[in-house]
Image: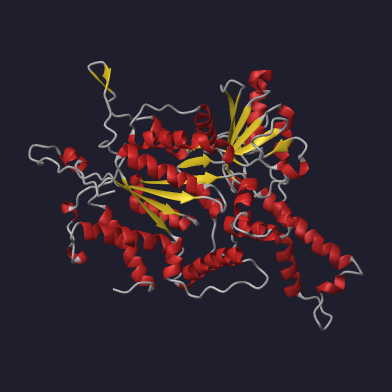
Amino acid sequence: MGLKEQEPQGGNIGKTTREKVKNTLTEELFFGICAPIGSLKQEVITSLTKILEDKYNYDVVPLKLSKYIDNYKINDFEALPGKTTAYSNLKYKINEGNRIRLKYKNNSVLAELAIQEIHLSRLEENKVKEPEKLDPTTFKSVRRCYIIDSIKNKEELLLLRRIYTKNFFQFSIFSPVDERVKTLRKKDLSPSEVENIVEIDDFENDNHGQNVRGTFTLGDFFLRVADSNLEELDLKIERFLHLIFESEIITPSIEETAMYSAKSAAGNSACLSRQVGASITDESGELISTGWNDVPKFGGNLYRENVPNDMRCKIKGYCSNDTQKDILVNKVIESIRKDDDLKSILHDKEGEVSLEIINNLKTSLRKSKIKDLIEFSRSVHAEMHAIIAGSQMSGSKMINGKLFCTTYPCHNCARHIIVAGIKEVYYIEPYVKSLCLTLHEDAITEDEKSSGKVRILVFDGVAPRNYLTFFTNFVERKKNGKLIPIDFETIKPKISKSLQALPTLEQQAIHSLKECGIIND
């Protein structure tokens, strides 16, 4: 499709400063895609593209970050011995991305290369031959959306959000694990290769590796996409776009309101590890209670600000759970020292007790399953707090209700969720320490088609961070008592950034690319 320029604005004579600034707002949109490997992200991209082009008169430009890995690769591709070509290629792309980030000491380098491409295209369209002399006031807004596929770490996301601010939205896409496995198996990966590549893509424990797990949770829109609900995808995408353009009156779903309540409740927590919030609705969707993680106080409920005798971790200055785990590690070392059959492992070649060996053993123990222990925390978890509060106030209304939590429930909370009669749990942030499926496979499942167990599902809808943005502060909706008609082909995004700011901000990313040496002046 051809370039669609905004009609020239009228003169600014007689206009207020606010009106003049409004005239500089751009129609451009920037969509980031974040999805665990094997998720049905292409279906989302296809739907976004079709609706934006057909309904909103937008040009859609896909930008695959993986192409910059090909352009700036450090090593040539080589098939891994004993591995399939498909697996070797996926592993190569992941490793090359890591090498590029490491070489240039820049975790957002791939996103910066995408920004550079957008910037150069902007200069070309506006016939700017000398970038150092560019005048952003002469740029024209165009109805264009860049879809950036795929964002793999937080630095990429945070940079794109910092540059494009109100015009950037991340779509976090999740497909059930069994469908992701099926998709990857279709690419001829072996079962063990699929398991390995899913784990690597999700999270690599190094400074330059991928962290899809952590990036996913920062999305603006969450989409749970499976073969069984593909027929609903276009309607979901249309709804999200209606919110971005305010092209239709959209109100929050029960699930979005409940998750917003959970996120709001998290702000009450003073936990040193993480703030977690939860909310519970009854069978009809009415909010019963909210909860957050914090230390219980005498007389009931949790400590709040300015409550007497507050001795939470923020006052003591240390985490009781971490402290007790360190004590446990020291006790294990002491037990080894006292055991005649084991104490020799703490000795060096000369038979002397080695402090270096002891310290290395302590480090190894801290990295073992000991680090996953959670029972030494003084805090009541958010889910437990919400269940107790809800039970006190609403009695049996919790049975067949739903629990919304900012974080996947731990195995301690899982048994309380089961006994409370809750039938569904929705979460945003994963919690890898949780053993709830391992310990309660008879009563809990992640299979959304199951009806005989408590279902734990990824949240689907507008992220809590955007709840007030999209569901408040509406533009004028009626005139002379009648709904104002919408022209989809000219309507602008509800919130936007001045086009005069974007080229300058994009130049900062290009400057960073020059500083790290990946491009030359």
**Residue 363: where, in percent of width, then height?**
70, 65
41 w.r.t. 470: above or below: below
Q: Is residue 498 left or right of residue 172?
A: left
Label total for image? 0
Where, by quadrant of the figure, is residue 6 drawn? top left
Q: Is residue 103 above or below residue 156?
A: below
Q: Is residue 296 visible?
A: no
Direction top: furthest residue: 481
Above or below — where is 66 with respect to 305?
below
Q: Nearer the viewer, residue 264 or 33?
A: 33
Q: Residue at x 46, y 62 (%)?
A: 66
Picture quarter with the C terminus: bottom left
Q: Is residue 93 visible?
A: yes
Residue plotted at (14% across, 42% down): 9
The outermost residue toward the right is 340
Give percent across and percent down for residue 178: 65, 46
Horizontal arrangement in the rendering, residue 455 relative to residue 491 (left or right) = right
- x then y, percent, for residue 104: 44, 71
Q: Residue furthest left?
A: 13
Front-most of 395 and 217? 217
Pick whichever, 439 or 492, lies toward us: 492
Q: Quadrant of residue 186?
A: bottom right
From the top left corner, tell me how far across and down residue 7 is, in percent.
17, 42
Nearer to us in this view, 205 or 453: 453
Q: What colouring method underlies this structural image?
A: secondary structure
Horizontally, residue 98 falls left or right of residue 386, namely left
Q: Residue at x 58, y 55 (%)?
A: 202
